[in-house]
Image (cartoon, rainbow, N blue to C red):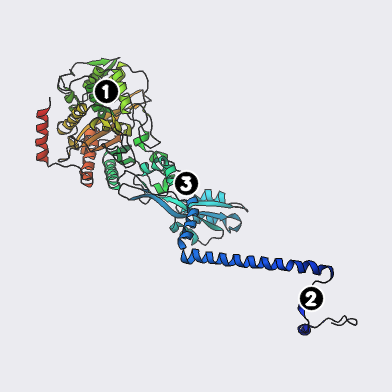
Amino acid sequence: MIGKNGDRLTPLADTQRINLSRLFVPKGNHAEPVQTARPRIAALGLVLAAAAVVLTARAADLTIFNPSSSVTANNRELVVAQPRAQIIDRNGVLLAGNIETWDVYVKRADIDNVERLATRLATLDGVPAREVLRQRLTGKTGRVRIARAVTPKLRRVIFDLSEPGIEFERRLSRYYPNQALASHLLGWVDADGMGAQGAERAFDARLRDDATPLQLALDSRVQFTLEDEIQKAVQVHKPLAILGIITDVTTGEVLAMASWPSFDLNHFNTTKPSHRRNRAVTDPYELGSVFKPLTLAIALETGMKMNEVEFNVQEKLVIAGRNIRDFHPGPSPMTAMDILVHSSNKGAAKMALLAGGKNQREYLARFGLLDRARIELRESAPAYMASQSWSPIKTATIGYGHGLAVTAVSFVSALGGVVNDGQQNPLTLLPQTPSDMLPIRVVSSETSRHVRAAMRKVVTDGSGRRADVPGYGVAGKTGSAEKWDSQSSSYAKDRNVSSFVAIFPWEAPKYMVFVLLDEPQGGTSTFGWETAGWNAAPAVHNIISRIGPILNAPFSPPGQQAKAELAAAREEP
C-alpha cells in the first residue's frame, strides 16, 4: 500500500527488520511511573508462582499420596443429601430400600401428534389414562410430568418409543423388594419422601436423619406364614376382612402383623384406601368372648376365689330390660373355669357384676383398653363406647365382650400382660433388650396362672379344640360377636366377628397369636357354622404348627406334656 512520502506502510514481509520491543517502550511523561512499577510487578509474579507451586503440591498429596482426605470431603456432600435409611427385619432381611428411578416429562412444543402420543403412553403401567394425558399434553409451551418414579425397565420402554420431547429426571425412590409383605405394618412414603403410614411414618425422623438401617422386631418368615394362612382362610371362609398379630409376650415385640385385603407397597397409590387400612390398629371391634379371660382376671384380682364360687346360669338374667342369653347352654352351676370352657355369657356377666363396675373400669384402664394402644404406630385408634356412663348393663355386657369396642393391638397388649405372669410390656415394632423393657404389673402372678389354666382347658375341653397343636401346649379362647347394625339399632344375627387368641406354651407363655375374621361365611367345611371354633381356631392351629419350628418355640412331646398337666392339676388349690 503506497501513500505520500514517509507514509508507505511496511509490508508484512519486512516486519523482521523492526525492533518490536521499541513499540511498547513508554516515552515522555509515562516513562517514570512504569519504571517505578516494574519491581512491584516482578514481586507479585514471584508470589503467584509460589502459590501455584503450593496448590499443585497439595493437589498431588490429596489425589495420589493421601486420597482418604478427598473421600472425607466428598462424604460431607453426601450427608447433606442423605438417602432415606433402609428398613430391615430382625434377621437382617431387607424390607425397604431405595432405588434409582426417573420422573418422566414431555415438552409440549416438541410433540408431533398429541393423540398418538397419549395413546401410546396410556398402555404403560404407572401412566395416566389416555383422556388425562390428552388434556395434559395439549398446548404450545411448557412441559408436563406424565409419570413419577418409573423403574429402569419402564424408562427403557418409554425411551424406545422414540417420541420427541420426552425427558427424564433422575431421582431416588423408596422401594419394597417384598411387594405386599408386611405392607400395612411398613407403610409408605409420600411424593415428598416423608413417611405417610406405618413404620415409615412412626420412625420418619430417624429414617431421614440417620443413614444406618432401621431394624424392626418383625420376622419375615413369621410374617409370610401369617399372611399365607390368612389368604387360605379368605378362600375357605370368604370374610369381608381378616387381621392377624403375632407377638412375643415376654418382650412386647411384634413379630408379625397382617391385614387383608392387602396391597403392593410399590403401587400403593393405585389401590383402594380400604385395602391400605391397617385394621389391626385402626378398626375397633366388639370382640365377644375372647374378652372373658380379662373378666376372669378382674374378678380374681377383686377377691373372687377361683374354685370357691359357683354361678347359676340356668336362671333367667335380665338387666335394664335386656335378656342375656348363652349361645350354648351348659351345666349349672358353673365355676369360674367352667364359664370360660363353656363360654357362658351369663356366667361372665355375673362374674363382672361381682367384681363391680368401678373395679372393671379401673382394670380396663390399667390394661390400656380405654385409650389408644401403646405402640409406635400413629394410626392407632382409641376405644369406642356408645355411652360413657358405666351402668350395670354396661358392666355385664363388657364382661362377655360387648359394649366396648377396642382395636386388636389394644386387646393383644392387654391379654399379653395378664398371661405374662401379670406383667405387661407395651407392644413395640423394635427389638428389645432387657435394659429396654419396663414392664408394668397389671395382675398378680397367681391370677395370671389361673387365667392361663382356664385358657388351656378351653383348648383341651372347650370350643378351642381345633386350635391345639400337640407338643406346644396351646391355650386360648374363642370369640364370636354379633356386629352392631346402625340402621336397625340392634345386633345383626347373621353378621359376626369371629376371633381366636392363643398363647404357647401355656405354663410360661412365650408367643401370642390372634386372628380375627370380619363376617366370615359358613360352608361345607364348617357345616354351615360361622363361629370362631370353626374358622379362627383352625387358622391359629395352622399358624402355630408352622411358626413353632421357625421360632424354635419350647416343645414337649405330647405324652410328657400330658403328664406335666396332670401333675399341675393335682397341685391346684
Residue 566: x and y in percent read: 9, 32
* Front-lying residue, 302 or 537: 302
N-terminal of the pair, mark 1 or mark 2, is 2
Mark whose residue sits in front, 1 or 3: 3
Q: Identify the residue position indicated by label 3 in the image.
A: 193
* Front-lying residue, 107 or 185: 185
| Quadrant of the rendering where the C terminus is positioned | top left
Q: Amino acid at mark 2?
A: Leu
Q: Identify the residue position indicated by label 1 in the image.
A: 399
- Residue, x 49% and y 63% (percent of image)? 62
Q: CA distance from mark 1 to mark 3?
A: 46 Å
Q: Residues within 10 Å of mark 2 (few under 14, many from 20)?
A: few
Q: Is residue 364 above or below residue 466?
A: above
Residue 177: x and y in percent read: 37, 52
**What is the quadrant of residue 310 in the picture?**
top left
Q: Secondary structure at mark 3?
A: loop
- Residue, x 32% and y 16% (percent of image)? 391
